[in-house]
Image (spheres, rainbow, N blue to C red):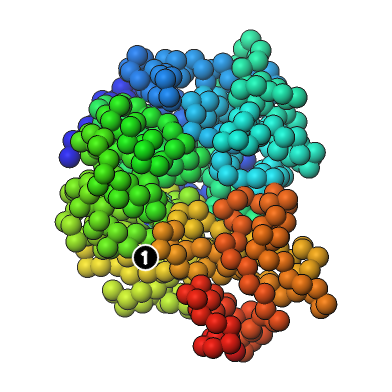
Amino acid sequence: MIFISYSMASGMDKPLPSRTRPKGDHVLDGCTPWPEEFAARYREAGYWRGETFDQLLRAWTRAHPHRTALVHGERRLDRAELERSADRVARRLAGLGVRAGDRVVLHLPNVPEFFSTFFALQRLGAIPVLALPLHRRSEIVHLCRLSQAVAYVVPDVHQDFDHRELAAEVLKESPELRHVVVAGDPGAHLPLDGPGADDLPPAPEDASEVALLLVSGGTTGLPKLIPRTHDDYAYNVRAGAELCGFGPDTVYLAALPVAHNFALGCPGVLGALYAGGSAVLTDEPDPDAAFALVERERVTATALVPPTVRMWAAATEWGEADLSSLRLLQVGGARLLPEHAAQARAAFGPVLQQVFGMAEGLLNYTEPDAPEDVVLHTQGRPLSADDEIRIVDEDDRDVPPGTTGRLLTRGPYTLRGYYRADEHNATAFTADGHYRTGDLVRRTPTGHLVVEGRVKEQINRGGDKVAAAEVEEQLVHHPAVLDTAVVPVPDDLLGERTCAFVVPVPGATAPDRNEAAAFLRERGLAPFKIPDRVESLDALPVTAVGKTDKKALTALARHLAAGGSRTEGNPCS
Ligand code: OOB
C-alpha cells in the first residue's frame, strides 16, 4: 500500500484553526448539529480540521496548479483551470443573485461542469443539493420545494433526455425557484457560462456549516436530504483516501454518478483530488467503454455496484484491454454475494475491496491488505475509530456478540438529523443520537460487519434504492387502483427487483405492467423506481394487527417470479 501524507500532497501543512461557532449561528436552519461535547471531541481528535471545500480546492491548486484534476473524453482540466472555471461559475451565479446559504439543485451527470458548479457554490457558501442523474420531475420538484432552492442547474440533453423541458415543468411547480441554468445550449433558460458579477463576496470560513445536501435512498415517501458539513465531509474524504492509499499517482475512474456519495467522496473524485491525483469522468460503466478508459488513462482505482462488477469480471474473459494499472476495485451499494466476490477476485486479483456505506454517513471498508476471507465474506470495518456501532434487537437492546441485529451508529461523519424532517427524525434516531440505519448486520470477531438484510422498507435494485412507500403513494393515484404494496423479488443480476401488487377499485381492471409504467413515468418518477412486475390481487393480505402483510406478499412475489401459480402453493391463500 502506498501511503502518502495528505498535508504534503495537498500543500497544507497544518490544519486551519477551527472556530467554535456560537450556538444558533447557522446559515442553514432545519439541521441538527452535533452536541458541543461531541464536536469538541472530533476537533480534538483531528477529524474536523476547520477546512472548507473552497479552501481545500485553493490549497490543491496552489500545491500543484498544473497537475491534471479532471479528464472527460478529450477534455483535460488541470487544477488551475478547475479553480478558474469554478470562479467563473461563482461570478455567474452571484450575478444571478445566489447568496451564501442559498440552496441550488445540482442535476448534472459526470461532466467537469459538475465540479465547477460544486466548487462555485462552495466559493459562495451556497449549498448544492445533489440530485441523481435519473431523478425526474417527481423527485426534482420535491427536492426544490423541500430545500427551497433558488436555482436548478441542468445539462441540455443527456442520454437522449432533454433536461430543459423537465426544468421548465419544475420551474412551474417550485415557488421558490428563480433560475434554471443550463450547462450547454440553454434553450429558453440561462446559460451556465453567461456573464457574471464583477466581484465576489468574501469566501465562507466556517467549516462547521453545511457544505452539501445529499439525497437519501429513502424508506418513507419521498427522498430525504442529508446535511453534510465541510468538517464532516472533508474527514469522510480524507480518511477514505488514506485508507485506500490514494496519492499523487491515483487516477480514479468515476463510473457511478458523482452526485452519489460513493463516487463523490468515498474516497471518490474528491479523495483523488485531495491526495494530489486525478479523476476520469464517464457515464458509461459498461466494460467495453470503461476498459478502454482504464487502459488509456492508466486508471488505478474505481468504484462499482455489484451488477457492474459481475459484468466486468465476465468481460475480462474475452476482453483484451490492459487493466494492469488497476490497484483498487471498490464494490458497494448493495450486497455482493461471496461467490460473486470470489469471481471478481479471480478476475482482478487482490485489488477487490468491499464498501458498505450510506449517504447518511457511516462507511465500512475492507482494508486493502485484508485477508481473502474478509474481502469475500464481509462488507468491511468502520472507517473511524470514533464510529460508534450498536447492534440491537427491536427493543434497542444489544444483541449477543456475533448475532444479527439492527445497526445503529453515530460518529464524526454521521448525520444527527435529516434536513427539515422533525417528524421523521423522531423515529430515525435514538434519543442519544444514534442513526437507525435500517440494516441488519452481524459483527465478526475482527470487527468487520456482514450485511444480512434490512428492516427498512427499501428495495435495493443493484445499488439504486427504491422506497416502497414512494412508489405506492404514486401508484395509488391511478384511477383503477384501490390499494397497492410494493415488495422486492430476488434477481440474479440486480440482487432485487420490484414487484407491485395492485388491488383494483370495484368494477375496474387493475393496470398491467405497461400501463402502470406509463402512468408512473407520466407522474415523473425516476425510471429505476418503475416496478419490474405488476400483479393484481383482490385484496392485500393483512397481519394480525391489520397492517399490510409485506412478508406474505414478498413470499408471493418470489413464488410468482419463480413461475409458481396463483392457486397452487400460493403463500397468501
Ligand atoms: C450507498 O449509499 P446509499 O445511501 O445509496 O445506500 C445506503 C444503503 C445501506 O443502508 C445499505 O442498505 C445498502 O445501501 N448498502 C449495502 C452495501 N452498501 C450499501 N448493502 C450491502 N452491502 C453493501 N456493501 O449505497 C453507499 C454510500 C457510500 C459508499 C458505498 C455505498
Q: Is residue 494 left or right of residue 159?
A: left
User: Three-letter amino acid code at disc 1?
Assistant: Val
Residue 223: x and y in percent read: 61, 53
| Residue 126 in view (yes/no) | no
Please name whichever residue, 390 or 407, is drawn nearer the observer in this view of the structure: 407
Image quarter for residue 543? bottom right
Q: Is residue 520 above or below residue 329?
A: below
Disc 1: which residue: 451
Q: Is residue 352 left or right of residue 420?
A: left
Residue 503: x and y in percent read: 71, 75
Question: Which quadrant does ligand 1 occupy?
Answer: bottom left
Q: Say which residue appears at 66% left-offset and 34% top-offset.
A: 162
Q: Is residue 562 left or right of residue 317?
A: right
Residue 4: x and y in percent read: 22, 32
Q: Is residue 250 above or below residue 344?
A: above
Please name whichever residue, 556 or 121, is drawn nearer the observer in this view of the structure: 556
